[in-house]
Amino acid sequence: MAKRQEPIRKTAREMLDDLRSGHHEASVSGPAAALKYLLRTLEGQQSLPNGVKAVVWDLVASERAALGDWAGVDEAVRAFLGYLPAMEEALGHGFRAALLATTALERGVQARSELGDFPGALDLCDRAIALDLGAHWEAKRESLDWAR
């Protein structure tokens, strides 16, 4: 009797590398193709770690912004924020670098501004400041401070 092959187990970082590579290849054909790749990844891989899903939703937000789908961007940013604690747990010491590489919060501010949700955009600025994502967030917040 043949010995059963064990499934290949990848770490969250390896899965993240695979995701970024696949996204890069798909993005050559434009944002619609990249978005299709990302959504299929979410649908087809139920075992995808939640920490990796945060990065998928970050990329979805970026592609939807490129397509001008502001409601879709806002939905993706909400999902990204929901998976953010899992991302920190999955990536450990690599979390900070991965977080700084994300653009979901910037896309979220852009989307909420486009949708007329200025208090929501301000909330995302506050969230970014709390995460210590850079001094430029203070300037963004100040430009939206009138929405309080």
Image (tube, rainbow, N blue to C red):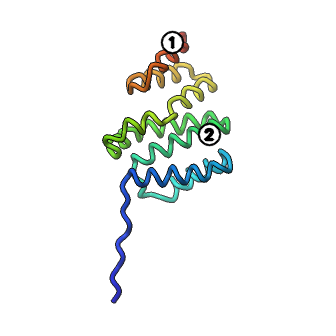
Residue identifier under label 2: 64
Return the x and y of residue 121 as percentages of the image width and height. 53, 23
Helix, strand or loop at mark 1: helix
Q: Residue at x 40, y 37 (%)?
A: 97
* CA gap, disc 1 and disc 2: 26 Å
Left or right side of 31 for 102 = left
Q: Earlier in the sequence, mark 1 or mark 2?
A: 2
* Quarter residue 144 falls in: top right
Residue at the spot x=41%, y=41% of the render? 83
145 and 16: which is toward the camera:
16
Q: Is residue 116 above or below residue 56?
A: above
Q: Residue at x 67, y 35 (%)?
A: 68
Count neighbours of disc 1 (C-alpha within 10 A) and say few if under 14, some if 14 to 19, many if 20 or more.
Answer: few
Q: Residue 98's mark?
A: none
Q: Quadrant of the N terminus?
A: bottom left
How many residues crowd mark 2 within 10 Å: few (<14), some (14–19), many (20+)? many
Is 69 drawn above or below residue 25 in the view shown? above
Q: Where in the figure is residue 105, as x and y percent of width and height?
A: 50, 30
Rendered location of residue 84, percent (x, y):
40, 38
The amino acid type of the residue labelled 1 equals Glu
Q: In the image, is 17 to the left or to the right of 40?
A: left
The amino acid on which the numbered mark 2 sits, given as a three-letter code, is Arg
Residues at circles 1 and 2 in contact by the CB criterion of under 8 Å:
no
Residue positioned most to the bottom: 1
User: In the drawing, does residue 123 fall left or right of residue 36?
Assistant: left
Residue topped by disc 1? 142
Q: Residue at x 61, y 41 (%)?
A: 63
